[in-house]
Amino acid sequence: MRLSLARPEQAPRLSQFYRSIHGPEFAHQELFKAETLAQLLTDGEIAIVVATHERELLGCGLAFVRSWNQSLEISTLSVSAHPRRGEIAKALFEALRRLGIKSYGIAFFRASTESSFRRGRDMGATCWGYRPAPGSQDIGQAELLMGFINPAGQHRRAEPPHNALTSTPFAMRIIDLLEEAERNVPYPRSFPVGCPRGTGAPVISGRIWPTYHSRGNYIYIENAAGAFPVEIIKEFTERVRKKGVRDVRLTLPVNHEQAYHELCAIGFRTVAYLPGWFLRGPNRFDCVELVFGAPPVNPTPTTFVERAVTKIHRDLRA
């Protein structure tokens, strides 16, 4: 079996393969069109690892490139009906993991079952938290966030400060596994942080740039410039919630302890600790992800995901 990175000129064959494997329920219908797939590969928005044997195409591993923080999100593994199907899928996943670690510095994926969680953990992944399903009020639909980080890669992870955000049991387990870190590197003064790709909207004394995901009915706040960022976030959240938005999300560098407490006081909840998530210059900085309007944690969890979320929720509280 040979593994290789897909090239744009392979798009017609790959598109045909995806159409043969998946139906109309497939989440990435854009891959069914050769022209679109070729453009995504050309622009570097996606990466696909292809598994072949002689001239037979055995499978494709899809990943999404996040250039703003140099990370790779491992997504769908598509494998043909082959006797070695499990082995092929495992090889595709490992190839994407290596690509993410070596070429970007961070690789992560979302696990929705106990088996996918355990497979990832067996390959060295660490649980970083959970992602509520966009706009859902069912915590059972959340996905567990699993990640790999190369702390000694091209961009070095900065040592986080010791405070309420980094001293939770959940954060300390992750930090203890990542002993390599650059000391005495100042953390970002502004918050929240994210890919500045949203629509600007004036609020109070500054501007925020929310990124809208209308299909899932949720919003990411990527920046809250101005003298009073928490007040800006509060007013913006109130406005969009009145218009029917289910939940609002943001990412906060872990040095902003006071902002963290103020955001929690107005209803935001921590759902993940993200090591080295924000990239600035030569360094990576730890962050926490918070969600306003997250579904309630089930007091009597029954499924694997519900039990995992309950434990994460307990261990993330500062």
Image (cartoon, rainbow, N blue to C red):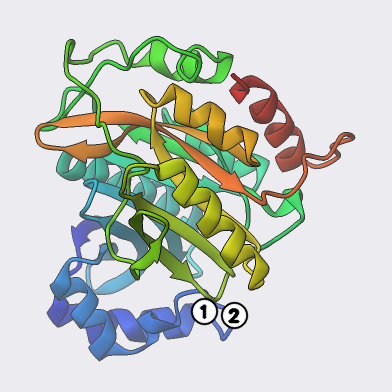
Q: Under tag 1, what secondary structure? A: loop
Circles 1 and 2, Cβ within 8 Å, touching? The answer is yes
Residue 173 placement, left or right of 269: left
Q: Is residue 245 above or below residue 248?
A: below
Answer with left or right where residue 234 lies relative to residue 174: right
Judging depth in this view, the residue of 122 and 91 nearest the camera is: 122
Residue placed under numbered mark 2 in the picture: 25
Residue beneath the point at 63% across and 57% down:
133
Residue 273 horizontal side relative to residue 285, left or right: right
Q: Amino acid at mark 1?
A: His
Quarter of the N terminus within the rendering? bottom left
Residue 42 located left or right of residue 56: left
- The 10 Å Cα crowd at callout 1, few under 14, some 14 to 19, many 20 or more, is some
> How far across and down, in percent of the image, does residue 83 sit?
50, 60
How many residues crowd mark 2 within 10 Å: few (<14), some (14–19), many (20+)? few
Who is closer to the viewer here, 166 or 5? 166
Rendering coords of residue 167 (x, y %): 50, 11
Query: Which residue corresponds to the image point at 65% horizontal and 46% vertical from the top-left?
Result: 113
Image coords of residue 268 (percent x, y)? 60, 41
Residue 189 sits in which quadrant? top left
Q: Which residue is mark 1?
A: 22
